[in-house]
Image (cartoon, rainbow, N blue to C red):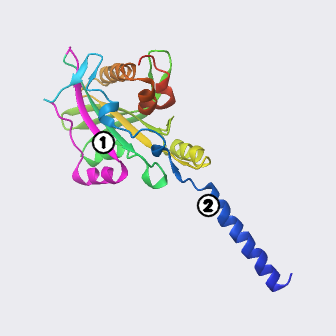
Amino acid sequence: MKPLLKAGVVFALMMASVGTAYVVTPRIHMADQGPKVDLEALFPKEINGWRIDDTMPVVMPAPDVQALLNRIYNSTLTRTYINADGERVMLSVAYGGDQSDGNEAHRPEVCYPAQGFQLRSNSYGSLALKNGASLPVHRLETQLTGRFEPVTYWIVVGDQIALTGFQQRLAQLKYGVQGLIPDGMLVRVSSINRDTEQAFALQNRFVNDLLTAAPPAARLRIAGAAGAKAPGG
């Protein structure tokens, strides 16, 4: 092949490659395709017998951790709820409009130790919903001196639950081939209790009450496709 012709073929292939990359590169933010996410409205102040308890604020992240969260997420919400029996559950939510590779959800198993907590256990499980469906969750046991705080959390990417980094990549790929950049939400519930089994049971009840109280569109946002199947709303 003549040098000039060869150079022309190489150039054409390079331009085709650039064109293909341009076509498949996600450019549409899912966050712009619907109503703006308002965490204050998405999570009611009263939930099936639970109300906000202003007497017990949730422990806030260390300044450096909070600075990172502010860079990753568009909005965050932190509350403590109490029921008629005096049982308390802490809720922490972080929402980001861009869950591309550079903006992955910041995981509690990272930020809890960053605040001085000891991570006593770290496992995956499922939270049974009232209609027989289940919500995949991540369970942690954390301790800070005499404070024992079991944690349940999950991450929603678009409308998919993605607990692991690999699952997040798959969700990003699923939306990416459609030209979409997914948004994401991390929902964390925790309670102070030395009895881990009892704490997780309480958290299960709270999550079910939350999803039952929420309308279908909110359930999809809060817990993905699994949450959308929950009864209520």
Q: What residue would you read off at disc 2?
A: 22
Image coords of residue 203 (percent x, y): 33, 24
- Amino acid at dot 1: Thr
Mark 2: secondary structure: helix
Name the image quarter holding residue 209.
top left
On-image quarter of the N terminus: bottom right
Eye-nearest disc, 1 or 2: 2
Query: Callout 1: helix, strand or loop?
Result: strand
Q: Is residue 141 visible?
A: yes
**How far apart are the alpha carbons under marks 1 and 2?**
33 Å
Which is more N-terminal, label 2 or label 1?
A: 2
Q: Position of residue 156 (x, y in %)?
A: 45, 37
Q: Is residue 227 above or below residue 118?
A: above
Percent position of residue 24, x then y: 63, 55
Residue 76 vertical position relative to residue 20 in the rendered view, above or below: above
In the rendered image, residue 93 lying in the magenta stretch gets the answer no
Give the camera-side residue of 92 and 39.
39
Name of the residue lying farthest toward the left: 55
Q: Which residues are magenta?
A: 56-85
Relative placement, left or right, of 8 versus 28 is: right
